[in-house]
Amino acid sequence: MPNYIEESGMHFIAENAFYIEKSAPYIPLKGSGIKSVEFIRIRNHDLLFVEAKTSIANPGNPDVENLKKFNTEIEDICDKFIHSLNLFSAIMVGVKKETLPIVFDSADQLSLMLILVVKDHDLKWCKPVQQKLQRILPEYFKKIWKPVVHVINHDAAIKHGIAIEIKEPPYGSLNPNRT
């Protein structure tokens, strides 16, 4: 596995990460109504479920079509978090077979963090998106898992050690076989 995971034009730290979206248990489920976040990562005492997006509808735009799109996007993201936790739990108890990074063997007493990273999202839009996600998560889910929800942009993800900045060489690839 490379030292980063590339999703939605961003590079995320792959240390102690399980790339659930590309995993053997998820691939046959894809397209059957089951959705997935990009990856799950253990960091300190947190279990991070990370979803990456290039954009999301503006939560402050009162246009009916925009609000409909925003609500649909939020519902989809919520499903991704819930479905991913269900699949991850099935893997952890052995219902689905998958080899996880060794750090997951000792996963104990972790706090659940649901993180949405929107690449170039305006920071002032993060709070209303976060509030909407928190509101529509099912009550049973919040009572059982007690998730912490964060919505951040790429710059904040870098600042908080979730993503990294990888810059392309100024003159393109140095690979002589590439045209």
Image (tube, helix red, strand yellow):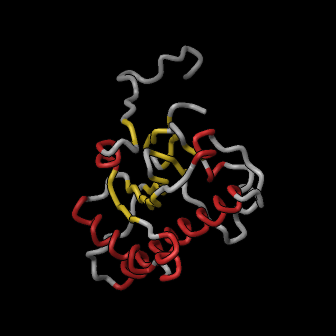
Query: Where residue 59 sits: x, y (%)?
Result: 31, 74
Query: What residue appears at the point 48 percent right and 78 percent down from the top-left corner?
Result: 143
Look at 39% across and 23% down and name the residue there: 169
Does residue 143 sit above or below 14 in this rendering?
below
- Residue 91, given in percent of the width and then of the height, sits at 70, 56
Q: Nearer the viewer, residue 29 or 167?
A: 29
Residue sticking out furthest to the top: 176
- Camera-side residue: 23 or 125? 23
Residue drawn at (55%, 53%), measured in percent from left and top?
108
| Quarter assignment of residue 172 | top left
Residue 114 drawn at (x, y percent)? 45, 61
Q: Quarter of the image holding residue 116?
A: bottom left
Q: Quadrant of the C terminus?
A: top right
Quadrant (top left, top right, bottom left, bottom right) of the N terminus: top right
The single residue placed furthest to the left in the displayed view is: 124
Q: Of residues 4 and 166, which is closer to you in this image?
A: 4
The number of callouts visible is 0
Residue drawn at x 26%, y 75% is 60
Q: Is residue 78 above or below residue 2?
A: below
Measured from the top left, where is residue 73 in percent x and y? 46, 72
Position above or below: 80 against 45: below
